[in-house]
Image: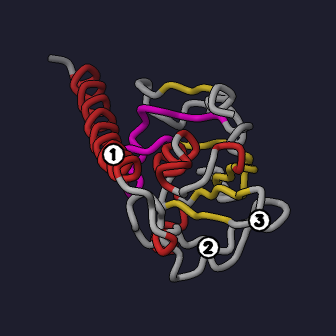
Amino acid sequence: MNKRWLRFVSVFMGLLISSVMLSTMGIAKEKQHKAHKAPATSKVTPAKHGLEMDGTMNISPSDRCPVCAMNVKKHAKFAAAIELENGETHYFCGTGCMIRTWLHPEVFLNVDKKQLKRAVVKDYFTGKPLDAMQAYWVAGSDVIGPMGPALVPLKAKPTGRFSSNATVEKPAFDCLA
């Protein structure tokens, strides 16, 4: 087999395994959520400090990803955020956990989808905040985030910096808004 085909299969399997793992976590959490009325004490703790107006993230050492419970500060390069209409902010270890929450806020944040205000990510190359709805999204690259192969957000369309197996979409989020 040629190396390019093996690379494609490797990336695809990595993304598939990550997706299945996140899906399994979400299904189990969703079943638990539906089976029991969440007690008042199970409220997800918002971030200590919210987003700036320009989307700059103010991640504190105590902020945890609501999906996987990773310490977000340790993975600041890949951090993402969701701000709610009430001003609360939740930070995520990576884009995968943030997207999962955007799709199922009732499972991961105990809030209705109507309460989601905005999603913010960091441009992979500059680290500057970026509206997730306006980002170019790269899938299938060789970038590994905290949860494995990462979906990479970019402000501008990439020019040859990713493997030929990578795909770029913009905006990938318009169907999720």
Closer to the eye: label 1 or 3: 1
Q: Say above or below: 48 vs 106.
A: below
Q: Nearer the viewer, residue 60 or 145?
A: 60
Task: Decide: is 133 above or below 130.
Answer: above
Q: Secondary structure at mark 1?
A: helix
Instruction: Please give the range of residues in magenta.
Output: 136-151
Residue drawn at 71 percent across, 38 percent down: 133
Q: CA distance from mark 2 to mark 1?
A: 26 Å
- Residue assigned mark 2: 47
> Which amino acid lies under the numbered mark 1 shown in the image of this protein?
Lys
Crowd class of label 3 (few under 14; some 14 to 19; many from 20; radius 10 Å): few
Give the Cα separation between the discs numbered 2 and 3. Answer: 10 Å
Residue bearing the label numbered 1? 31
What's the residue type where badge 2 is placed? Ala
Pick whichever of labels 2 and 1 is earlier in the sequence: 1
**Image quarter for residue 132?**
top right
Residue at disc 3, secondary structure: loop
User: Along the line of sight, which residue is nearer the eye, 167 or 4?
Assistant: 167
